[in-house]
Image: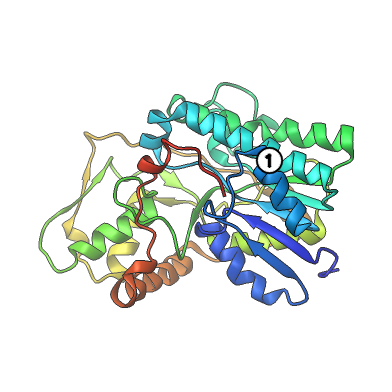
């Protein structure tokens, strides 16, 4: 079954999940891959997208490309995030339809769930309320993928499915200090502070709980879905292991040889959402998947960061998404 889809196109291949899928692809011999970044094609351009599909003629597509980032980016550029992500969704789906792509995987996000949805977050509650005001542009764009999957399956018979990762971390994450997610931001800050005695201040009181899935696990899940899942029901695919912000900070400090006593939590700063646990039971029933424990994935990520920073810092992703988001982005 592994070679049922031989020519596979992966968009968004330069980011943390895309590079993990690239690494995992080495275990899938007999397949040809096209790994795309925004330099290769502007997926907000329907004609350029169509030409790309015409040239490569993929059997399957893993669509990871998105304009995304932290709260600051989402609040400053809501129209850009809404517009560009919706355009990419429909340009990819239209190209897949026109060129008779046998399988298309679309990527949603747990960030789209309404903040008042009951916990754990279940796929049935995606549309039960307005998304959080801080990221409503990107959230509505990602939610739209759910009815788009249904519509393209019903009207065109397109084999398109949707996967919903939670927080992603791992090698080749975004380490830019201005808009990096929490885990890579803390790794970089603590690495930079390891030879000083300065306190390391973290916003909030450290109590919020977070689910972070190691990127290589998600890469394996995408290949599982490619070969084993063909239903229209979108799936939560992230781990349900929760760790507090405090525990995550202490783990990073321990692995970098930093005294925990240097870490200061600032309760005057916002905590963010206290908890946003997910229900991945549909996926687990089908796959029996077992996740890498967070601390194991964290150790691998820190080792990669330290090695790369010290030996080849040009490979680290340090560019600010805030600068990029003012222009249409893709892949």
Residue drawn at (50%, 56%) of the image? 15
Residue 270 picture quarter: top left
Residue 276, x across and y down, in percent:
51, 39
Query: Which residue in the protein does label 1 denote?
Result: 47
Mark yes or no: residue 142 visible: no
Residue drawn at (68%, 40%) of the image? 47
Residue 329, x across and y down, in percent:
51, 42
| Colouring scheme, one of rainbow, by chain, secondary structure, one colour | rainbow
In front of the other: 183 or 208: 183
In front of the other: 170 or 281: 170
Residue drawn at (24%, 71%) of the image? 257
Q: Residue furthest top?
A: 129
* Residue 292, above or below 262: below
Residue 259, x across and y down, in percent:
19, 65
Q: Residues within 10 Å of mark 1 (few under 14, many from 20)?
A: few
Residue drawn at (37%, 64%) of the image? 316
* Residue 228, above or below 211: below
Q: Quadrant of the N terminus?
A: bottom right
Residue 30 picture quarter: bottom right
- 18 lies left or right of 282: left
Mark yes or no: residue 212 visible: yes
């Amino acid at each position: 079954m592994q070679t049922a889809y031989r020519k596979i196109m992966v968009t968004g291949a330069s980011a943390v999940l895309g590079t993990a899928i690239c690494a995992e692809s080495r275990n899938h011999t007999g397949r040809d891959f096209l790994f795309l970044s925004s330099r290769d094609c502007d997926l907000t351009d329907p004609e350029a997208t169509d030409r790309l599909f015409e040239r490569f003629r993929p059997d399957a597509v893993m669509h990871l490309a998105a304009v995304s980032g932290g709260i600051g980016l989402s609040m400053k550029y809501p129209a850009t995030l809404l517009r560009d992500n919706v355009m990419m969704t429909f340009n990819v789906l239209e190209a897949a339809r026109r060129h008779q792509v046998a399988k298309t995987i679309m990527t949603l996000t747990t960030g789209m769930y309404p903040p008042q949805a009951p916990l754990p977050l279940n796929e049935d509650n995606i549309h039960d309320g307005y998304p959080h005001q801080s990221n409503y542009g990107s959230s509505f764009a990602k939610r739209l993928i759910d009815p788009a999957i249904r519509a393209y399956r019903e009207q065109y018979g397109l084999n398109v499915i949707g996967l919903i990762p939670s927080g992603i971390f791992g090698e080749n994450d975004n380490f830019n200090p201005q808009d990096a997610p929490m885990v890579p931001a803390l790794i970089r800050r603590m690495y930079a502070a390891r030879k000083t005695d300065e306190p390391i201040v973290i916003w909030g009181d450290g109590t919020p709980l977070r689910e972070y899935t190691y990127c290589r696990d998600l890469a394996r899940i995408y290949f599982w879905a490619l070969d084993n899942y063909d239903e229209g029901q979108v799936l939560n695919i992230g781990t349900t292991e929760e760790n507090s912000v405090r525990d995550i900070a202490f783990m990073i400090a321990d692995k970098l040889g930093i005294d925990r006593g240097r870490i200061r939590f600032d309760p005057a700063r916002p905590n963010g959402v206290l908890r946003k646990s997910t229900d991945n039971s549909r996926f687990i029933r089908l796959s029996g998947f077992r996740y890498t424990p967070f601390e194991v994935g964290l150790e691998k990520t820190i080792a990669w960061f330290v090695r790369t920073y010290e030996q080849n810092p040009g490979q680290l992703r340090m560019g600010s998404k805030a600068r990029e988001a003012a222009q249409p982005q893709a892949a």
